[in-house]
Amino acid sequence: MNGLIVKNVRIYSPEPMGSGDVFIFGGKIAKTGKHISWDAFKECGCTVQTIDGTGLLAVPGFIDQHVHFNGAGGEGGPLYRTPPTPLSVLIKAGITTAIGLLGTDGFTRSLRELLMKARSLESQGITTKIFTGAYQIPGPVLTSDIASDIILIDKVIGLKIAYSDHRSSHAGIQTLRETVSQARVGGILSGKSGAVMIHIGEGPHRLRPFLNIAETTDIPLSQFIPTHLNRSREVLEESVLWGKEGGYVDISAGVSSRYGFVSAVSPGSAVLQLLERGVAEDRITMSSDGNGVMTVTDPATGKHRPLIAPVRSLFEEFVQMVRE
């Protein structure tokens, strides 16, 4: 069996540990520390390769809580359906935990296929979970209902819905309350989060219905994970209040002007603005929306144009934030 030592790399775990060595053996990180010796491994006939990591950083793998690893899209027609994501694309993006989900297409795309893709990726070495549901309310489920999916299926940790978007079901507030309640109860009975991942679109309602739910029920803001909150300045502005009230604010790394989303606030800038305006660091998350398709409106023609968010965006934005 072969080993690999990366020498003199700056290690974060996630706290800074200073410069040291990282020893990788059998496909796993076996040890980190100062001046790791591999003489004993040579004596047992193992081959050890060394790499000079001077000037490099070693950080934990990323948790991407919003990645369409079984494909997504279809807006604009079948031509715009994205294929499943291979393991290599996730690994090259530094993602070691991926949470998959459906999007607009809760009709021809299958939660069964999503679940099996999650199991396939996990068998190849990364950690995977999924959300039940899709943009629609009621959305697709694997069993009889949302709560049962979360309780009975190990990989299902919560629910995906969409709101304030022309592609959503435009559900009323009472329907929203009942839907979210299923996810919460499913989480309680299964020992999972029962989180509700909310695609927030460009509509006028944004986060207000979910503030209403938190105010008029016993469901806390922490039950919700609204995402794409950097898609416009207006949405980001509303997310400041949401975050200061204790809600999670998920920034989409793949929704950026560098990938064609001209009206979006750059992910790094969005994080900085949230912090400067008093949103706690532990309320801010970032996900890629990788392999997902979102539509942008051409200001000149008014026509919708589909764009694909790259999986690598989470890594690229992280690097840019560190450098800046």
Image (spheres, rainbow, N blue to C red):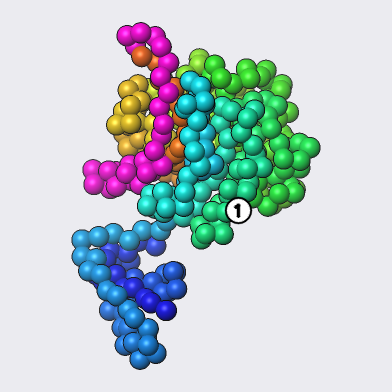
Residue in the foreground of this view, choosing between 15 and 143: 143
Residue in the foreground of this view, choosing between 84 and 290: 84
- Relative side of 301 to 229, left or right: left
Mark 1: secondary structure: helix
Q: Which residue is pictured at 28% across the width and 59% down the height?
A: 57
Q: Is residue 24 magenta?
A: no
Residue under numbered circle 1: 119
Q: Which percent across, then down, holds residue 147?
A: 74, 40
Confirm whether residue 158 shows in the render. Answer: no
Within the image, what quadrant is residue 218 found in? top right
Residue in the foreground of this view, choosing between 7 and 227: 7
Confirm whether residue 304 shows in the render. Answer: yes
Q: Which residue is pictured at 25% across the width and 70% down the height?
A: 51
Q: Which percent across, then down, holds residue 150?
A: 70, 44
Q: Is residue 304 magenta?
A: yes
Extreme-top residue of the structure: 301
Residue in the foreground of this view, choosing between 242 and 173: 173
Q: Which percent across, then down, holds residue 5?
A: 31, 73
Quarter the C terminus occupies: top left
Q: Is residue 84 above or below residue 216?
A: below
Within the image, what quadrant is residue 255 found in? top left
- Segment colored magenta: 299-324
Q: Which percent across, then down, holds residue 160?
A: 60, 34
| Amino acid of disc 1 | Arg
